[in-house]
Image (tube, rainbow, N blue to C red):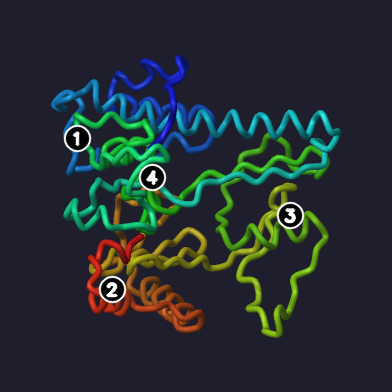
């Protein structure tokens, strides 16, 4: 996490800690109509302490402040783009599509032996632009933000970011894959101000952009056939229509899921399949697989057929490749 300075807007906002702030965020999500009042919040991650029992509270707050400051900097950058579009007279007919790529990350740093972790050149520079050595880790003597630091904000704050869900980035439970999508296009005839609860997926973004722009999807490029698009345009839904029901699929580091209508079948590697009725249990707290074996069998068969069709590489194969190269298995997860 890198940020040159913490805005006064952020100062003090996280002093109450993750437990109180999870409850407040949950309340706000319901008040804003994003979640229904019947939605249950998951319990605090059982591996994390209550805020009242947390040591080094001042340092913990600085971690979350640095994370939030990055988001604020991003917001300001988006604001500059909007002002430029307005100045140029193209704002009304510009479509904005904004979403995050996954749930919050719980990763601790370093992820394994510090000396070996420091050898990673794909994500970690050895030194700053001025030649200062990098200080890596999540310890109170390293205050995140400066260029010579390489830190994360930790599992407890990620649990707050993922309110009200369980799990995180890497998993395909809702805490790893549920992300808000914001679409803004004044001249596009959208259902302005509406909150939609129709499930969609990242594979739907490209078809949406193609329809918005009127572009066509090529069949070939550089002399090779291109795989057909997996998703569908979200433009009809954004204009108030109902999308047709279709299965949505996930696989990431051995974790797997399929959603079809109200049902979601999900697996945390290396455990078995779980089944959730998302219409009644948005936060996946009540596994109903034992009482619905037919639904489990049907969705599992659909997921396995999809995995075969698109060529999902079994997680154990991926791990084996990393082990053969003498690399830590954690690297396989990104």
Front-most of 109 and 261?
Answer: 109
**Is disc 3 placed on a helix, strand or loop?**
helix
* Image vertical order of residue 41 relative to residue 57, above or below: below
**Is disc 2 placed on a helix, strand or loop?**
helix
Q: Where is residue 166 in the image (x, y as percent from the top left)?
A: 32, 47
Residue that badge 4 annotates: 104
Q: Position of residue 276 (x, y in %)?
A: 37, 58
Query: In the rendered image, which quarter contains the C terminus?
Result: bottom left
**Is disc 4 placed on a helix, strand or loop?**
loop
Mark 2 and mark 1: span between their CA atoms? Answer: 29 Å
The numbered disc on residue 24 is: none
**Residue farthest right in this picture:** 89
Q: Would you identify the image quadrant in which residue 17 lies? A: top left
* Image vertical order of residue 151 relative to residue 126, above or below: above
The numbered disc on residue 139 is: 1
Front-most of 14 and 107?
Answer: 107
Q: Pick whichever of labels 4 and 3 is earlier in the sequence.
A: 4
């Amino acid at each position: 996490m890198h940020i040159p300075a913490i805005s006064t807007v952020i100062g003090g906002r996280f002093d109450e800690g993750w437990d109180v702030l999870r409850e407040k965020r949950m309340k706000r999500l319901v008040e804003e109509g994003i979640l229904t009042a019947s939605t249950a919040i998951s319990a605090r991650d059982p591996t994390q302490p209550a805020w009242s029992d947390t040591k080094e509270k001042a340092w913990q707050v600085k971690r979350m402040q640095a994370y939030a400051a990055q988001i604020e900097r991003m917001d300001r950058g988006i604001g500059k783009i909007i002002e430029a579009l307005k100045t140029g007279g193209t704002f009304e007919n510009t479509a904005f599509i904004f979403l995050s790529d996954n749930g919050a990350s719980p990763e601790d740093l370093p992820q394994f032996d510090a000396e070996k972790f420091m050898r990673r050149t794909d994500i970690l520079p050895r030194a700053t632009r001025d030649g200062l050595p990098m200080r890596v880790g999540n310890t109170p003597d390293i205050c995140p933000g400066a260029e010579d630091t390489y830190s994360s904000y930790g599992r407890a704050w990620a649990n707050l970011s993922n309110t009200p869900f369980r799990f995180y980035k890497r998993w395909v439970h809702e805490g790893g894959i549920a992300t808000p999508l914001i679409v803004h296009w004044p001249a596009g005839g959208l259902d302005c101000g509406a909150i939609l609860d129709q499930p969609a997926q990242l594979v739907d973004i490209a078809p949406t952009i193609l329809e918005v722009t009127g572009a066509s999807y090529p069949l070939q490029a550089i002399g090779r056939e291109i795989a057909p698009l997996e998703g569908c345009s979200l433009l009809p839904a954004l204009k108030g229509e109902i999308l047709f029901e279709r299965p949505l699929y996930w696989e990431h580091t051995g974790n797997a899921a399929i959603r079809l209508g109200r049902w979601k079948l999900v697996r945390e590697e290396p455990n078995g399949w779980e089944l959730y009725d998302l219409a009644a249990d948005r936060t996946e707290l009540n596994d109903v697989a034992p009482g619905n074996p037919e639904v489990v069998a049907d969705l599992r068969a659909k997921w396995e057929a999809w995995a075969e069709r698109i060529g999902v590489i079994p997680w154990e194969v991926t791990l084996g490749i990393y082990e053969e190269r003498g690399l830590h298995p954690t690297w396989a997860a990104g």
